[in-house]
Image (tube, rainbow, N blue to C red):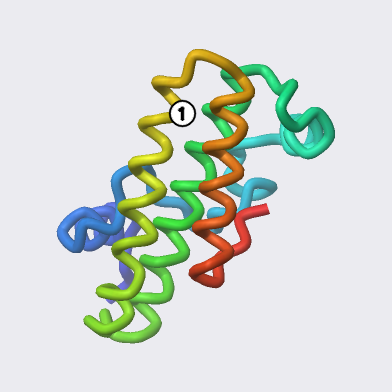
Amino acid sequence: MQTTLADLRKIGEALNIITTEIQINPYWEYSKLLDKEEVLEFLEKTENCDLELLKDVAYYILTYAENITLAASLANDFDSNYLEWMMPCLEKLRKLLKQIHDARSSKEAYRKVRQMIDVCLNYGIDPL
């Protein structure tokens, strides 16, 4: 029996892993959540990025982390130790995404996006 995207979504939601969207390949270039120009703008302009771009980057980071966590969980037969270890990462990223959506300036949002990247890297996830 083949697992469908709908099946993966149900599994991810039931385990509180997925709150964004399911992606077959969550990397920005394949997921189409960001394009090359947006990634380059984020990397080059840093604090001077458009606030909406920073919100898009933050959403992508959370989507990437959630999908990588789900994929690793599937590969490890939903090892509870792995899920316990990863849930604080996802919770931190979700909290930061909300703060970014509430941010009043690009500089504030940029600092939060950088925090999201740091959280990912601390858990062995490199979204960019």
Spot occupied by residue 73 in the image (x, y as percentages of width and height) = 34, 75
Spot occupied by residue 34 in the image (x, y as percentages of width and height) = 64, 36
Please tell me in which quadrant of the rendered image residue 84 appears. Answer: bottom left
Which residue is at 28% across, 73% downward?
83
Q: Is residue 44 left or right of residue 3?
A: right
Q: Point out the image quarter for the N terminus.
A: bottom left
Depth order, front residue of 32/5: 32
Q: Is residue 63 left or right of residue 46?
A: left
Depth order, front residue of 2/19: 19
Depth order, front residue of 104/67: 104
- Answer above or below: position of 4 versus 44: below
Residue found at the very far top of the displayed protein: 104
Please tell me in which quadrant of the rendered image residue 44 appears. Answer: top right
Spot occupied by residue 35 in the image (x, y as percentages of width and height) = 71, 35
Which residue is at 58% across, 64% downward?
121
Depth order, front residue of 45/73: 45
Residue picked out by circle 1: 100
Tally the numbered discs. Answer: 1
- Answer above or below: position of 50 versus 126: above
- Answer above or below: position of 20 versus 100: below
Which residue is at 39% across, 82% downward?
75
Of helix, strand and loop, which one carries label 1? helix
Which residue is at 41% across, 48% downward?
93
Residue type at numbered disc 1:
Ile
